[in-house]
Amino acid sequence: MDNRAGEMEVFVAVCETRSFSAAGRRLRLSPSAVSKLVTRIEDRLGTRLLVRSTRTLQLTPEGEVYLQRAQRILTEIAETEQLVAAGGRLSPRGLLRINASVGFGERYILPLAPAFLERYPEVRLDLTLTDSLIDVVGERADVAIRTGPLRDSSLKARKLMESRPVVIASPAYLAKHGVPQTPADLENHNCIRFNFRRSVDEWAFRVPGQSSVELLSVFGNLQVSSGAIVQQLCLAGVGIGRIGRFHAEPDLAAGRLVALLEEYRPDEIETVYAVYAGHEHLAARIRAFIDFLAERI
């Protein structure tokens, strides 16, 4: 009987190292043996998984699918063996890759990380904070934090919290430039906008006396890549920003920031989710982290 798991381990090593030679060193095999094993997989499947050149290895679409499934299967095999060896109780362990927005990461994940690692000392965290939208599967993130509607139906999600957008400025900025009384007044203010691809230069406001919402174009001399940067610039008195309220809550409570145009705020709730590639046997480290976030937040 073929050693399919062994072949998968070789293929994953090749993809992770981008080299037959490096994969061979990791697995103590010759480069030619590694190449033959990859060819054997392709011959059996009847499709090419890797495009080889003198300098690079590139996954085909079929190779991407095989890699994702192979990584999942190898993880389940390892955890099954750990489970049996541990007498049926598998403790969370291994590398946990987390992707979150800068604001959420700084507000929640960084402060909670020490307590999580103390509770689960065999887990290693790999944390990436970015407001750019990543491909959870393609970037191999175990857990990603997402706000708003979920577009990828292949992913599983657990609700962590709800928030609302809030328009903010510092007391110093308002003392110097005045307090906008209506959304139209923002035309005379420096509005800090986002520069990532999915952003729009329009803010939503409720029409007075109605349930409808109108979008207002805003302008300013700064575009930035995260809500955390908007928050810091507003604290510095640079302009007016619009971010999720959970980012700004401590500064609003302390009076370092002021919420503006609240009477025009739409009934817009932003749900924050922990998103992951779900399957029947979710890795213990992933489940532990999501449960921990839900418990603490």
Image (cartoon, grey):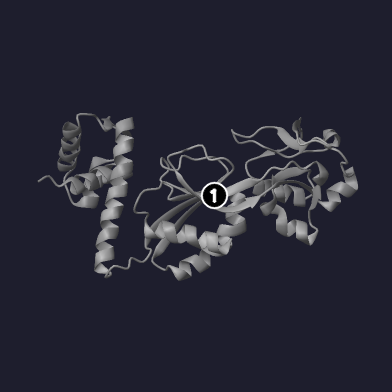
At x 84%, y 33%, the residue is 184
Nearer the observer, 295 or 200: 295
Q: Which residue is mark 1?
A: 273
Report whether residue 150 is seen: yes
Residue 266 against residue 235 in the figure, above or below? above
Nearer the observer, 295 or 167: 295
Q: Position of residue 68 (x, y in %)?
A: 33, 42
**Kind of residue sitting beneath label 1:** Tyr
Q: Position of residue 112 (x, y in %)?
A: 55, 64
Nearer the observer, 32 or 180: 180
From this viewpoint, which residue is outermost toward the front?
A: 210
Give the crowd class for mark 1: few <14, some 14-19, many >=20 residues within 10 Å.
Answer: many
Is residue 130 rendered to the left or right of residue 211?
Answer: left
Is residue 270 rendered to the left or right of residue 2?
Answer: right
At x 71%, y 49%, the residue is 231
Report whether residue 18 is seen: no
